[in-house]
Amino acid sequence: MLVEFNTLPNNSRIWIYQSNRKFSEDEVSSISDKTDEFLKQWTAHGDDLEAGFEIKYNRFIVIGLNQANASASGCSIDASVNFIQSLEQDMNVDLLDKMNVTFYNGEFIAHKSLSDFKKMAKNRSVSRNTVVFNNLVNTKAEYLEHWEVPAKDSWHSRFLA
């Protein structure tokens, strides 16, 4: 069951998929349409899942699930991963590689491999105050409060002096 993302409770489970590049406006429209359709039919053991999504900065697909009515099962999580993989193929983007880092570089959002980010940290091209996107948040509340944070307040801090 598709709902507006902003109506999901703060304890809703969150999955964040970051793209290796910015989506065009046409791609955002296509992704929105396809995600609408997927979430309308997303179920776990025959129960409708109350879910919503948003696309942030034309780069991140954020899916939220209210687990109060029904929780995601292994099969429903597999279905969502298969859906994201189909988007990757349709859009020719990378959405599932967790070994990449996205952060603000001035007013722009940069996307680097983890090894490049480590090199940038060593060369002091990024600092403890560089705002990073912590895609490991698990709930909507964490997403709203701790997704865009200084690197010193995220798992990224281990790479910074």
Image (cartoon, helix red, strand yellow):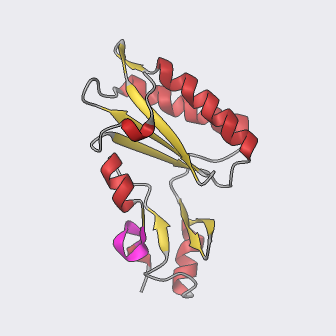
Residue 123 position within the rendered picture, expressed as x and y whole percent measured from the top left: 57, 87
Q: Nearer the viewer, residue 137 or 113?
A: 137
In the image, is residue 101 above or below residue 119?
A: above
Position of 10 compared to 111: left or right?
left
Position of 57 compared to 153: left or right?
right
Q: Quadrant of residue 33?
A: top right
Type of secondary structure dominating the magenta stretch: helix
Q: Residue at x 32, y 32 (%)?
A: 66
Q: Quadrant of residue 105?
A: bottom right
Residue 132 position within the rendered picture, expressed as x and y whole percent measured from the top left: 48, 68
Q: Residue at x 41, y 25 (%)?
A: 76
Direction left: furthest residue: 68
Residue 126 position within the rendered picture, expressed as x and y whole percent measured from the top left: 53, 81
Confirm whether residue 89 shows in the render.
Answer: no
Q: Residue at x 68, y 54 (%)?
A: 22
> From the image, which quarter does the C terminus lie in?
bottom left
Position of 137 compared to 117: left or right?
left
> From the image, which quarter does the N terminus lie in?
top left
For the magenta stretch, what is the residue range? Answer: 149-156
Q: Quadrant of residue 46?
A: top left
Q: Nearer the viewer, residue 85 or 6?
A: 6
Residue 153 position within the rendered picture, expressed as x and y whole percent measured from the top left: 35, 72
Position of 68 compared to 133: left or right?
left
Q: Residue at x 26, y 24 (%)?
A: 69
Q: Does the magenta portion include 15?
A: no
